[in-house]
Amino acid sequence: MKTVGFRWKNFFVCVTIFAVAAAALTAVGCTGSQATAEADKHLVLNCSFDYMKVGESRRYYIKKYPAQAGYETVWESLDENVAIVDEKGEVTALSGGETTITVSAKNTPYKAAMKLTVADETVDPEAGINALQEAVDNVKNDGYVLIKGGYYPSLIVSKRVSVTGAEGARIGDVKIKDGGALYLYSTEIYAASGSGSEACVNMNENAEFTAVGCSFLYDREEKEPPSDTAVLSPSDAVRVYLRACSFSGYSTCVKIGATEGEIRIVNNDFSDADVAVEIDMRDSVTGKNKEPFGVVADNVYLGCDDCVKLCYYASSYTGRLETDDADVSVPS
């Protein structure tokens, strides 16, 4: 468990829980991560991850060979439906999705890999503030969109779509409609001061939200109170998955209503919140608990009054949701 800073736990019916030879070949590319960090490895690629659009080709190269030069190298793509790679390291993007490009030195244990995201649609900042919405509307279900920087004040998602941000991409207000699913990577969710939005990410019933490596920031004026919520799922969410994200400027960072869906909130940083994570399982219609499953664990809480708050009817609580971040006390 990683817990930093101040932490208080209240126990009511609403319980607080949560080379030697180097190769220097000319190549187009590595727009995603630029060069990889130098490390004491036998085989190193010039990229650790990158982004491409369907139909694009780009050549990658080896920065460092094994200590004994002369090994035959073998290039592979984990998913050849997404992208293929030839014997010289030239990758061609075929369809939206994610794959891993590997290069190995034949008959040795030496191997290097990079992650590749292929987008069906790309969004350029020069295209205007509505370009992201247009791209999401244009892709097919389960499509991939790459944002090449810029700020987009709103986004409405009514299908299954993956969005990856690059070069400081920002989104202001996200609504995931009934049945929609948003998979968001490396993007900043930014609420401007005085925006008045109830939450930065609003989920309807039967919606899914995944955020990996994202930041949720409310940029408030001095002495202005924090915004209410970063991620809000009133009830019946299918999935809320948050990993390696940071939250700052919110009264409640993540608020999830009664659901029997999957909740996984791990390895995130929460700062200066009244409540970092609140999950209310009580179904006011049936008078019983809904039972989500998953885990809330290994998060960092800095200056949060309450870390993880579970609200439930004590008589029917089963504890299917793992909460390693705080003590669990079943109310009488």
Image (cartoon, rainbow, N blue to C red):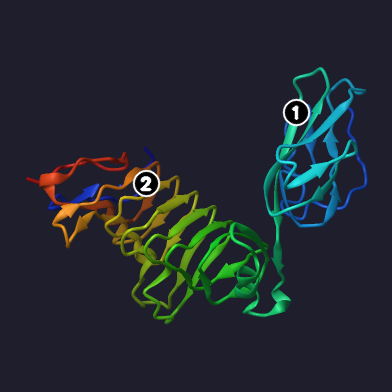
Q: Quadrant of the C terminus?
A: top left
Residue 33 vs residue 72, the one in the foreground: 72
Q: Quadrant of the N terminus?
A: top left
Q: Residue at x 67, y 80 (%)?
A: 128
- What's the residue type where badge 1 is placed? Lys
Q: Position of residue 141 (x, y in %)?
A: 59, 60
Residue denoted by label 2 = 4
How far apart are the alpha carbons under marks 1 and 2? 37 Å
Q: Residues within 10 Å of mark 1 (few under 14, many from 20)?
A: some
Q: Residue at x 29, y 60 (%)?
A: 257
Tell me: 171 left or right of 248.
Answer: right
- What's the residue type where badge 2 is placed? Val
Decide if residue 19 is in sight here: no
Q: Position of residue 203 (x, y in %)?
A: 40, 65
| Label 1: which secondary element | strand
Q: Position of residue 69 (x, y in %)?
A: 91, 23
Residue 216 vs residue 197, the one in the foreground: 197
User: What is the number of the mark on residue 111?
Assistant: 1
Tell me: 59 left or right of 208.
Answer: right
